Image (spheres, grey):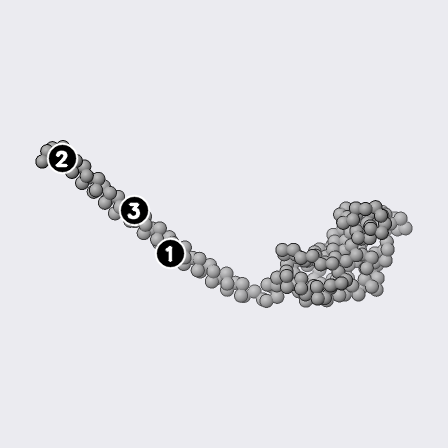
Amino acid sequence: MKLRELILILIILIIITIFFLYNKFYVSPLKNYVLELEKEREVLTEKISKELSSLIESFPKEERETVPAVFEEAKRILSGEFSLREERNKLEIEILTDEIFEPGGYKISKKGEEKLSKLYEFLNKINFKEIEVGVHTDRIPVKSKEDLFPTNWELSARRATEILRYLVQKGIPEEKIYASAYGNSRPVEKSLKIELQKKNRRAVFKIIF
């Protein structure tokens, strides 16, 4: 056998040996490590899934109410008298303030008490985080009571707090309800026609779950 052939065979043997050693001391341990990580991931995923399911089941049923379910209850009790809007974690209930107060006034009328009493009936049936009572006005100033309400901001603030006070007295926890006064800053109807301005005089109850 020639020297060149011996050298070639030797080189091949060396390459085979290097490949074997690489596979034994690097590739195989790496594969085993990846398999161990995969097993640990599966165990951890299963553990987290069980703990999460256990946590969800531990919640009282009323604390897991969904907005769609509450929305259906709202339609049953309030439909026809209030406007309803459903969002991801929020329910908005709206009513024209003409249904609650006398024009330009801040005292709740008998009709208004009936409307708010029905609203309280609904609120008392559900579990919520908080409620914002937001009151809006039109852009027409209250000229007859400028000493009390220099602008519509003051009128909306007084109306909002009157509604809030009524609901708290009925039983809504005061730490879960707050009032916001928007005046005429967020109109839904921008027309200057008096008959259309009525749409801007509204109270919006934002219920957060």
> In the image, what residue occupies the spot 33% across and 51% down?
33
Q: x and y percent of residue 130 in the render?
A: 67, 58
| Number of marks in picture | 3
Q: Which residue is mark 3?
A: 27
Mark toward the start of the polypeptide (3 vs 1): 3
Residue count near mark 3 (Cα–Cα under 10 Å), binned few <14, some 14–19, many ≥20: few
Tell me if residue 154 can be seen: no
Q: Cβ–Cβ below 8 Å for labels 3 and 1?
A: no
Q: Is residue 5 left or right of residue 40?
A: left
Q: x and y percent of residue 58 in the render?
A: 54, 66
Q: x and y percent of residue 75 in the render?
A: 70, 64
Tell me the SS state at disc 3.
Answer: helix
Q: Which residue is mark 1?
A: 39
Identify which amino acid the numbered label 1 is placed on. Lys
> In the image, what residue occupies the spot 81% across and 59% down?
99
Residue count near mark 2 (Cα–Cα under 10 Å), binned few <14, some 14–19, many ≥20: few
Q: Residue furthest right?
A: 144
Identify which amino acid the numbered label 2 is placed on. Glu
